[in-house]
Structures are given as C-alpha cells and as structure tokens.
Image: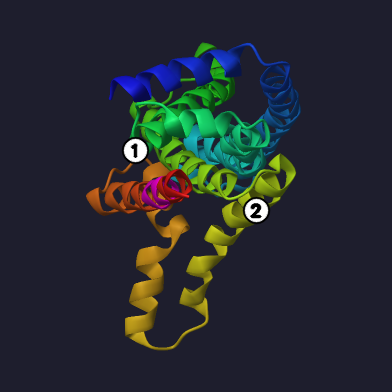
Amino acid sequence: MRGALVIFKKEMKAFLSSPNFLLVCGLMVTILSWVFPNALKMFEIQIRSAMFSGGFNNQSMNIHYGLFLRHLSYLNLILIFVVPALTMRLFSEEKKLKTFDLLLTSPITSYEIVLGKMMAALGAVLFVMLLSAIYPVSMAFFADFNWGTLLVAYFGIFLVASVYTAMDLFCSSLTESGIVAYVMAVIMNVFIWFVGMGVDIVDSSTARAIFEHISLSQHLSSLVEGTVRTTGIVYFLSLVFLFGFLNERVVESARWR
C-alpha cells in the first residue's frame, strides 16, 4: 500500500502542475458557465408556463428535477471526454518514455501500480467535479433545496466517473500512444451507455431483466433522484474492480515479458 501512495502523490502532483490539466479545467468551467445560465433560464420559463397554464406538479416546480438534473447530465457528457484526457497519459506516456520499465523493476507490485494511478486519476476527477459543483451550490443564495438529494446525485455521477476512470486507465495500459488511448477510452465511455438499450429490443422477460441489471442508466437514475440502492453501488464498484483487475493483469504480463 505504501508504494501505491507514493505513485498517487507523484501523479497527483503532476496533475496539479500540468498546464494540460489546468486547460481541461478551464474549458470545462467555460462550457458550464455558458450552459448553466441557459438551463436556469429554461427552468424559469418552465415555472412561468406552469403558472399560466395552471399545470403545477412537484417535478416542474422542483429545482432538483428542473435544474440540477439538467446540469448533471451536462456534467456527465463532459466527463465522457474529460476523463480520457486525464487518464490517457498515465500508462501510455510511461511506455513511450521507457520509464514504465523502471516502474516494473522497482520493488512494488503491479496491484500497487494500478491502485496508485487510479487513485490519482480519481483525485483529478473529483477536483473537476468540485469545480462543477460551484454552480448548483451558488443557487443556495437564491433558493431553498434539499442538500442531501444533491449530494447523493453527485455521488452517483462520481460513481459513473469512477467507471470511466477504470475503463480509460485500462485503455491507457494497452498502448504507447496517448491519442489511441484517448480514442479507445471515449468509445468505451459511449458504448457502455448503449449496453442497456437492449431492454427496448428484446422480448424475453429474462433477457430484459439481464439488460436492466447491466444498464448503467438504470442504476444511475435512482441515485440522481436522491435514492441510494445497494444494488446500484455494488454494480458500479463491480465494474471498477473488473477493469482494475484487467489493468493489473496487463501490467503484470508486461513485467513477465
């Protein structure tokens, strides 16, 4: 575990001092600074139309459903492209610069190598998500809302981002090219959302139950609405463990070669 902490500190320091990381954060803040006011204006229009039509319902007047969930959907879309940008260099650059061989011959296990780099990537992702949280938190000056529901929703997005991180880190371990790793990671991030679409295609009840169980959106939907379910957490952690294990196997195989 000590070796993992050493790698975590090294990679985290590299993230925070990297111009590319600061550029990614700046671009994300710029995008959210444009889309959040637009989402707020749409929420205002929604409330006004409900007032004039008399069609009040709990969700149309709820800031969490009308504004925050839209903000989180934008954040998730951004993370699909941002997380690969953060993880693509962690293994591929080491291989390209031949420092990966030094890492393999050091007195540290492949498990600690993967764990340290994953913790650093998750730390960078968490930093990005904290920047995005400035926008909904700022609404506390103008409206009252349930903080617990917002925190659970952000926790759900963080679990999804953790899955992205594990998959994208695995992609980085497969190649020496950062560009190839980035493209592979984006494809996997997008593909995982389409897996659950089999629910609408198959007719068998058994097949539908299987697709519902492996559907990312099915497990995320309850979390973003503020409901914590054990099955959803186990699902996300299982994916993180799976790709972390595959990543460890790639590193270990490189050590033996």
Q: Sequence order check: which comes first, mark 1 or mark 2?
A: 1
Position of residue 220 measured from the top left corner of the image (x, y, whole percent): 42, 50
Under mark 1, the amino acid is: Tyr
* The magenta segment: 244-249
SS for dot 1 = helix
* Secondary structure character of the magenta stretch overall: helix
> Residue at image x 41%, y 59%?
218
The residue beneath circle 2 is: 184
Q: Residue furthest bottom?
A: 203
SS for dot 2 = helix
> Residue at image x 30%, y 46%?
233
Give the label on residue 111, or none: 1
Taking depth in this image into account, of 63 and 46 the one nearest to the observer is: 63
Around disc 1, counting alpha carbons within 10 Å, would you say few (fewer than 14), some (14 to 19), or many (20 or more)? Answer: some
Task: Left or right? Give the position of 111 relative to 54.
Answer: left
Around disc 2, counting alpha carbons within 10 Å, would you say few (fewer than 14), some (14 to 19), or many (20 or more)? Answer: many
Taking depth in this image into account, of 85 and 205 the one nearest to the observer is: 85
> Residue at image x 62%, y 32%?
98
